[in-house]
Amino acid sequence: MRLMGMDVGSRTVGISVSDQLGWTAQGVEIVPINEDEEIFGIERVKELVKEYDVVGFVLGLPKNMNNTEGPRVEAARNYGKLLEETFGLPIDFQDERLTTVEAERMLIEQADTSRSKRKKVIDKLAASLILENYLNGHGKLIDRLK
């Protein structure tokens, strides 16, 4: 049993999963979506939920730096609601401020990754950071792993 972390954008969803003990998070893939056309990648998420025996979702909540909520927060909450309705599994949110910035810095400084390569993995890495932060903060869904 694992938790699935998600970095929800308007065009992609970065996906990560925890290990079975809830100690670490690993990036899995980036699922293409299109909010404008109401294509949310749910079929692929279903496959991943089954493959990884997911028991709950942790979505990044992209609050503004002053802690206010903008339109992307609403989009993340709506995606969470869709997941809850589709899978009947619990969801929780993790403040994701600066995770994409941190992910990009890691890719530049530690992996010396080119811009084109960064675009291919940044959402997956951001999803890993979101889930890792959640696990380290002992979020309420961690008990579902036991």
Image: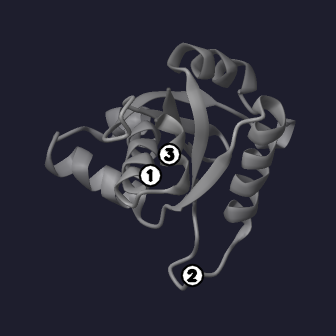
Which numbered disc flags the more N-terminal residue, 3 or 2? 2
* Mark linked to residue 130: 1
Q: Position of residue 84 (x, y in %)?
A: 77, 41
Residue at x 42% of width, y 55% of height: 100
Q: Which residue is mark 2?
A: 67
Which numbered disc flags the more N-terminal residue, 2 or 1? 2
Q: Amino acid at mark 2?
A: Asn
Which numbered disc flags the more N-terminal residue, 1 or 3? 1
Q: Position of residue 119 (x, y in %)?
A: 42, 38
Q: Is residue 79 above or below residue 93?
A: above
Residues at badges 3 and 2 in contact (C-beta under 8 Å)? no
Task: Name the side, left or right, on which 126 lies relative to 9.
Answer: left
Query: Which tag is nearer the camera, tag 1 or tag 3?
Result: 3
Q: Position of residue 7 (x, y in %)?
A: 54, 46
Q: Residues within 10 Å of mark 2 (few under 14, many from 20)?
A: few
Q: CA distance from mark 3 to mark 2?
A: 28 Å
Q: Position of residue 40 (x, y in %)?
A: 75, 33
Q: Amino acid at mark 3?
A: Asp
Residue at the extreme front = 146
Task: Name the side, left or right, on which 75 lies relative to 124.
Answer: right
